[in-house]
């Protein structure tokens, strides 16, 4: 887990279950009641699920030592923030850093690292450091003081200073001598060994010997701590995560350390409800301060995080991602694991070189140094994440101690995008549903009286559009001619479809159906959607050349067609129970093709464009929290990526629209974003 200061907008499907369930039910059902919708249960349920896909469970920030699964940094998704990345190259005063990038499957990923670029020749960077010990005074009278408490014969401050993180050790990697130096420097030299060994032999990134600030004292109420037996007669305090993070920030503020130095907050033998340590950054008066917060634990049998295991973990990750949340990757799986959906989703697919090895005892290596035995975190080299078949690192390895014998297996990671937020003026809820190639957006908003309206968004201007006489209007698609497809609810709560064009509404209802919902329209004026006959079985339909035809997928007893491109290719879902799992499909000249995201429990393709790329939402089981979480997805060049947004619509110019949530105003909002095809996923260029 990284940042402590949240930006204005946090968007992420796994974060807003409570609001989703309450608001979505009130939103979609308003102003009609559940009873009024009873004559057509399947279609309204499925309409609601398309815009507000249901979720089961909510990841928690709380837990005991076993609940965080042995991770050090904790769960990054719980702190997913949009808009807080420091994407400008000029950060003012901060530590020295350099930038580069790599490409994977046609998308470019930029990264920043501490020091200088090893490709540009030998240079030595020394970053000054300051250790801030913490003194925790507990309400029950116990005191844990990192500056004075002895752990394995020395204080944690002394233990860190005496360790190979600060002191030289004669390091070899795979039998190759990489330097008599500090661990972080040895790691980085080995990481870029192709440059270091040939033209940058005197390349170094070193930590200056630290100064030690006065201990920062914190009083901890009993309600915010759990004392866990260590097995050696002592106890390990587990402090509420938010409290511990705020105490860390308070310690940094009081110490007033220059942003050009690395601040290290030493918790001692203490940890949080999620984390054992982290590396982050915070705005300083004249720049950006990078810092590490770390615990330091005794050498207890069968406990992996002994002495400097956590500290060395954070130092490696600070070196390779100093501004935290800034270096995105295509996603990765931990060593010895292969899952369809990248397990690095836990930390937002960041360049977390230590997290790769947290789940195996082999990820921690004991070194017998002149100052005693220390346990170091194994670190993954850059090409573990780039998946290059030929590693640039020492001996062609993918990690320092050789635990990783190959790069991460391919998996579905998330795609970082920067949204433009769409919020109808004074609306309680705004959802963007469709977008054409001119960037015109249609969607729905809920006013302060809980009435649902359609809207058009065009170059910053909003226009309300309601079906005459209805208290519920939904606009689902707009084509390049400006034709809009949607539906309204009648007084009985049944949906009826229409096309709006040049100031007029034209009914589009499947013959003999009790209800019809139009979900998509292409530039030829073809319309797709779903309808119910008298029995509560939903069928898909296409309206083409003035004729209706049913579309029934072979992947379930019920079908909804959600989108159609200009070539007549369609995307939709099939299911047996509208409240149960759905299966995605693509339907075209070759017939039906199933699309279920690998590892997903449910897949809903909401949109398809002329390139045959499609996007929507999916749900997966969270092995860390035992919950079912929802995400958006999109395909680019035939490769699938996850999104922290509900994707509902897309056009032929790499733009997408959908759902977002503003945690400051506590409102659901729409967004439009450009997919980062062939460019930096951070800036959407």
Image: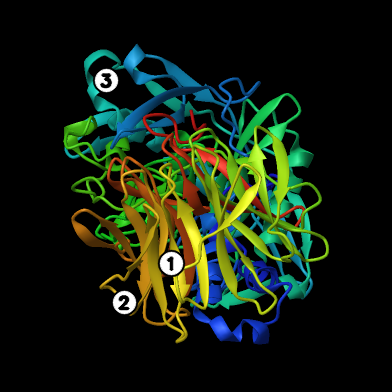
> Which residue is identified by label 3?
195
Describe the element under mark 1 as helix, strand or loop.
strand
Give the CA separation, mark 3 to mark 2.
Answer: 56 Å
Q: Nearer the viewer, mark 2 or mark 1?
A: 2
> Does residue 668 appear to the left or right of 200 in the view shown?
right
- Could you tell me residue 400's position as x and y percent? 28, 41
Quarter of image, res 110: top left
For the residues bearing labels 3 and 2, Cβ distance under 8 angstroms: no
Residue in front for this viewpoint, 579 or 641: 579
Which one is earlier in the sequence, the residue at label 3 or at label 2?
3
- Could you tell me residue 372's position as x and y percent? 40, 50
Which one is earlier in the sequence, the residue at label 2 or at label 1?
2
For the residues bearing labels 1 and 3, Cβ distance under 8 angstroms: no
Residue plotted at (27% across, 45% down):
638
> Which residue is identified by label 2?
556
Residue in front for this viewpoint, 644 or 320: 644
Quarter of image, res 611: top left
> Which residue is identified by label 1?
619
- Could you tell me residue 366's position as x and y percent? 33, 53
- Whether 162 is drawn above or below 542: the answer is above
- Could you tell me residue 313's position as x and y percent? 44, 48
Residue plotted at (43% across, 26% down):
205
Give the CA separation, mark 2 to mark 1.
Answer: 18 Å
- Whether 570 is drawn above or below 672: the answer is below
């Amino acid at each position: 887990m990284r940042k402590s200061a949240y930006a204005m907008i946090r968007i992420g499907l796994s974060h807003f279950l409570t609001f989703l369930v309450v608001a979505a039910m009130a939103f979609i059902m308003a102003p009609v009641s559940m009873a009024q919708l009873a004559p057509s249960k399947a279609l309204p349920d499925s309409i609601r699920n398309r815009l507000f896909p249901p979720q089961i469970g909510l990841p928690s920030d709380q837990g005991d030592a076993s609940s965080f699964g042995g991770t050090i940094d904790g769960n990054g998704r719980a702190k997913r923030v949009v808009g807080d990345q420091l994407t400008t190259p000029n950060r003012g005063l901060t530590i020295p850093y350099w930038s580069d990038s790599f490409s994977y499957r046609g998308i470019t990923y930029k990264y920043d690292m501490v020091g200088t670029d090893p490709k540009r020749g030998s240079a030595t960077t020394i970053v000054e450091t300051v250790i801030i010990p913490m003194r925790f005074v507990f309400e029950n009278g116990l005191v844990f003081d990192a500056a004075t408490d002895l752990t394995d014969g020395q204080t944690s401050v002394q233990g860190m200073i005496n360790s190979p993180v600060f002191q030289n050790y004669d390091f070899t990697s795979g039998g190759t001598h990489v330097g008599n130096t500090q661990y972080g420097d040895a790691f980085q030299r080995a990481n870029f060994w192709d440059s270091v060994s040939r033209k940058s032999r005197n390349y170094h990134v070193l930590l200056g010997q630290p100064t030690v600030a006065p201990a920062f004292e914190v009083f901890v109420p009993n309600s915010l701590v759990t004392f866990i037996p260590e097995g050696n007669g002592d106890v390990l305090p587990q402090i509420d995560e938010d409290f511990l993070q705020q105490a860390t920030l308070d310690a940094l503020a009081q110490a007033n350390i220059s942003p050009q130095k690395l601040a290290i907050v030493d918790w001692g033998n203490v940890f949080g409800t999620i984390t054992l340590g982290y590396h982050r950054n915070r705005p300083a008066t004249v720049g950006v301060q990078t810092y590490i917060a770390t615990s330091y634990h005794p050498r207890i049998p069968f406990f992996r995080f002994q002495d400097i295991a956590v500290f060395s973990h954070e130092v490696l990750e600070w070196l390779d991602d100093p501004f935290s949340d800034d270096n995105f990757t295509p996603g990765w799986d931990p060593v010895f694991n292969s899952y369809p959906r990248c397990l690095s989703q836990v930390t937002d697919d960041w360049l977390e070189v230590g997290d790769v090895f947290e789940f195996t005892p082999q990820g921690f290596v004991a070194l017998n140094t002149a100052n005693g035995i220390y346990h170091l975190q194994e670190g993954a080299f850059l090409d573990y994440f780039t998946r290059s078949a030929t590693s640039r690192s020492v001996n062609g390895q993918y990690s320092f101690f050789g635990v990783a014998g190959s790069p991460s297996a391919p998996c579905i990671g998330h795609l970082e995008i920067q949204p433009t937020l769409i919020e109808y003026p004074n609306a309680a809820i705004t959802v963007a549903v469709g977008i054409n190639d001119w960037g015109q957006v249609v969607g729905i908003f809920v006013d302060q009286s809980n009435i649902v309206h359609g809207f058009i968004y065009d170059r910053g201007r909003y226009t309300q559009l309601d079906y005459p006489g209805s208290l519920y209007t939904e606009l689902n698609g707009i084509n390049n001619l400006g034709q809009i497809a949607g539906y309204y609810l009648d007084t009985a709560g049944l949906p009826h479809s229409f096309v709006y064009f040049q100031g007029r509404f034209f009914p589009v209802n499947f013959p003999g159906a009790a209800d019809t919902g139009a979900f998509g329209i292409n530039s030829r004026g073809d319309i797709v959607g779903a309808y119910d006959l008298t029995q509560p079985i939903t069928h898909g339909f296409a309206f083409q050349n003035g004729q209706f035809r049913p579309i029934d997928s072979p992947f379930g007893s019920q079908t909804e067609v959600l989108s159609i491109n200009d070539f007549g290719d369609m995307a939709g879902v099939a299911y047996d129970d509208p409240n149960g799992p759905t299966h995605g499909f693509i339907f075209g000249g070759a017939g039906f093709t199933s699309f279920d995201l690998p590892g997903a429990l449910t897949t809903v393709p909401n949109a398809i464009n002329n390139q045959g790329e499609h996007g929507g939402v999916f749900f997966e089981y969270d092995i860390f929290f035992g919950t079912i979480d929802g995400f958006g997805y999109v395909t680019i060049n035939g490769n699938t990526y996850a999104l922290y947004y509900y994707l509902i619509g897309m056009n032929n110019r790499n733009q997408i629209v959908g759902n977002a949530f503003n945690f400051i105003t506590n409102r659901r909002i729409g967004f439009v974003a450009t997919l980062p095809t062939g460019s930096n996923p951070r800036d959407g260029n």
